[in-house]
Amino acid sequence: MHQGIMKAWIESSHLNGANSTYVEQMYEAYQEDPQSVTEDWRVVFDNLPPASGTTVDVPEASHSKVRDYFRSLALDGRQKGSPKVTDHEVDAKQVKVLQLINAHRFRGHQNADLDPLNIWKRDTVSELDPAFHGLDGDDMEREFNTGSFAHGGETMKLADLVKALKATYCGSIGAEYMHITDTDEKRWIQQRFEPSLGAASYSKTDKTRILEGLNAAEGMEKYLGAKFPGAKRFSLEGGDALVPMMREIIYRAGDAGTKEVIIGMAHRGRLNVLVNILGKKPSELFDEFAGKHGDELNGSGDVKYHQGFSSDFETPGGNIHLALAFNPSHLEIVNPVVIGSVRARLDRRGCDTGLQVMPITIHGDSAITGQGIVQETFNMSQTRGFKVGGSIRIVVNNQVGFTTNMTEDVRSTEYCTDIAKMVQAPIFHVNADDPEAVAFVSQLAVDYRNEFKRDVVIDLVCYRRHGHNEADEPSATQPIMYAKIKKHPTPRKIYADRLIAEKTMGSDDVTSMVNDYRDALDHGDCVVKEWRPMTLNSVDWTPYIGSEWNDPYDAKTPMAKIKNLVGKISYVPDSHKLHSRVAKIYKDRLAMAAGEKLLDWGFAETLAYASILEDKKRIRITGQDSGRGTFFHRHAVLHNQNDATAYMPLRNIADDQGPIDITDSVLSEASVLAFEYGYATAEPSGLTLWEAQFGDFANCAQVVIDQFLSSGEQKWGRLCGLTMLLPHGYEGQGPEHSSARLERFLQLCANHNMQVCVPSTPAQVYHMLRRQVVRPMRRPLVVMSPKSLLRHPLAVSSLEEIAEGTFQNLIGEIDEQDASKVDRVVFCSGKVYFELLERRRKEGLDNVALIRVEQLYPFPLDEAANILAQYAHVKDYVWCQEEPQNQGAWYCSQHHFWSVIPAGAQLSYAGREASAAPACGYPALHAQQQESLINSALKLSK
Ligand code: AMP
């Protein structure tokens, strides 16, 4: 033992206020990471008996030895008088007391009273027992220093301290926060939690408000149950406290100055939230139960428990706009949608703290732990492109997943919320039968989120009074649980009895509250007294509603403007040292800007963004490599080789230009695409783009494409102008990096729900991107974007084509050709066009015309008719594609081709044979297949 240990021990002996806190802080740090404390202290702590969460496992005997040794060192060091042995015993016990406090902070939640049904079996945590720490009967009457425990004075009788610890950490709230490494955050939570022993004292008004929430939650479900017996409503009953919880959160957010709260939730309790929080009229809901629907939607509509809603809500701190996001059945996928919507609103408000717009996501206990999208969303929560200043995440934990048992079958973690620890979110487990505890954590959660701008979780431990839906018989699979539930009083009854017992309310008051609510439902009008008509909506969607893809528009950019912009996008300050390969690209861009070189893809695409920014519109681009571009073609974000700073030419277009964010995304497709969908459905005026690294990766986000992008407008009337860039093309890269699965998108096309484009030239990409913003129609744009075409010598355009052209949905023959000699017309899309063209030129064929379909959906029938007019004599039409026959456009688009060719003409297929895999893996086989399909399209025998 060296001198340093002795000094440390002596300094901390008699652990008075400051010293004990210091030791305790170090001990906590040591428990997180033994290497984070100095070696002196590591040795001291290594030799203490094991406590929860520690990595040491030292037998008590060795600790005694060390302690005795320290005691003798302390005796030697104290120099004044003859120290009493009892002092040193107290010293040792004092350390144990601090360990006991720490054990409660770490593990108190494991013995908290969380389960209203009391069926959740939990092991007793021995570290929470004073005896475990060697603190016995006599010690209970002694005063000990309480370190940083923020209740009472500096010292407390151990018996009182134990009581206070139990009340704080083992009552109706189980606070899990010691996994957070930031000491300030932990201290903040302790300061909020410990002084009041994990509870707040509520006034009569507060208590009445809380009971009103429970009364509304229960009243609503009972009313629906009686009026529409057996109809699916995914009752909230058992988790009724969600309603007062949401109200507390919204009130607290109002106090903090929040202007919008965006909510995402699945079906459980949704009708209750719609009526009791958002203020949807009960009469409208009843009409939906009766099978009626309003005329405002022309689409297919959706079931009532997927519907969204918007309203304003008055709080003492100011009105808040509430929006409940529309939601498909697919659990948890709405979360990134909500976060994306929040980010769009924050960006629009210029608020980068997150304060003005707050997300609340409501999860199921099985889903939050089972669905990977939750992990993806947590992972986004602190990243540059996706953060929103934290989300309030609520779990309606009814301890059963449909019919699956919670502990044995649904998860492998202790809590369903363990996933939140990956971002060190604090987690407050709370017994839903104690609505005051629920209100307490609700306020705490809002304050934590606003203070630290990070996610926070409330685990509302409750039960489900009925089956998964009201037609189910839950006793068949959960007999013990449901026997208990049948006898268990409702949360409203429990709380009302409590208020009556403590004389806050009389039983008559309680009965009238029940009757008044039922009468209000009978009446059918809004039951939320804070409801206000929407006035805070900052976006007017009316200019976009009812617009169609073929409405006329003017997206032209005059040459003078183009010339100004090309200079701006090619300029890089001399001080910003580029990598040599990037410098070469920018040198070429200068030549393109000067008109010395034809424009390539990257230049035209960047120019499109510049023109949109100059129009003061916002642009947001995300994707896994969107700054550079997967294929090294974009280079919108330039990295200084000397100091790694970034320069974006697109941010330097004009003083009053629109804002642009180009951010490399987290390595996910589902959550990022869902986020961008949410962003684009809340921000119609600009251009929102998501780029897949390779197009086939989009199939990881298939649920977003199916449930939101392709069908959201039809189901929910929600417009979305998101653009998806999906690199696509058969270049011998194997089954996974060839196809963006064009067929999947085409199969989803109907009712002009989205556009599927395959632009083949730089000018086309320019016009396509501009059109997406300038034209008022807001519908998803799915782009099969190129790879090798990015640098193809024929895929170039002139500045004139940019300034004077427009997007061509179909491009006819470009070579001088006598149409009367043509006996075959080949339709195609994308890069295969250039292979056909080169081969035709090489072979000197003058009998085959090539027509590029640049927009496969909506199919441009009129333009096709115009171009085909000159080939009225032709009987032989071919669709040529690189994809296998069962993929690509052949099956999904051929009815369009049939509809534009002359009556009696034939349409045949030139492409790869049907195949289970999208592409072959052998380069030689790829080349052979490619040669064969070109030959077949051009009627060449070779
Ligand atoms: P929100 O701010 O999401 O609550 O939306 C307020 C109102 O704007 C809604 O009630 C709709 O009328 C309209 N709105 C919002 N988003 C869209 C959208 N993506 N498409 C069409 N209308 C929308």
Image: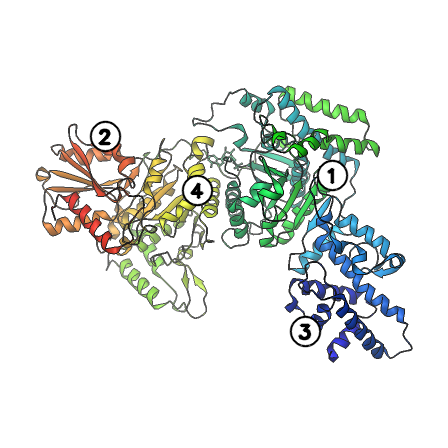
- In the rendered image, residue 688, in percent from the top left (x then y), is placed at 42, 46
Residue 470 drawn above or below residue 730: above
Q: Which residue is mark 3?
A: 39
Labelled pair 2, 1 in contact (Cβ < 8 Å): no
Q: CA gap, disc 4 to disc 3? A: 59 Å
Disc number placed over residue 434 in the picture, else none: 1
Judge depth for marks 4 and 2 and give the one in front: 2
- In the rendered image, residue 698, in percent from the top left (x then y), is placed at 40, 46
- Toward which corner of the image does residue 637 lie, by quadrant? bottom left
Judge depth for marks 1 and 3 and give the one in front: 3
- Toward which corner of the image does residue 434 lie, by quadrant? top right
Q: Residues within 10 Å of mark 2 (few under 14, many from 20)?
A: few
Q: CA gap, disc 1 to disc 3? A: 46 Å
Instruction: Compare marks 4 and 3 and give the one earlier in the sequence.
Output: 3
- Toward which corner of the image does residue 529 lie, by quadrant? top right
At label 2, which amino acid type do we have? Ser
> 928 or 653: nearer the eye?
928
At label 4, which amino acid type do we have? Ser
Instruction: Compare marks 1 and 4 and give the one earlier in the sequence.
Output: 1
At label 1, which amino acid type do we have? Asp
Residue at horizontal 80%, vertical 34%? 498
Residue at horizontal 38%, vertical 67%? 578
Q: Which residue is mark 2?
A: 899
> 472 or 91: nearer the eye?
472
Labelled pair 3, 2 in contact (Cβ < 8 Å): no
At label 3, which amino acid type do we have? Glu
Judge depth for marks 2 and 1 and give the one in front: 1
- In the rendered image, residue 530, in percent from the top left (x then y), is placed at 65, 32
Q: Which residue is mark 4?
A: 685
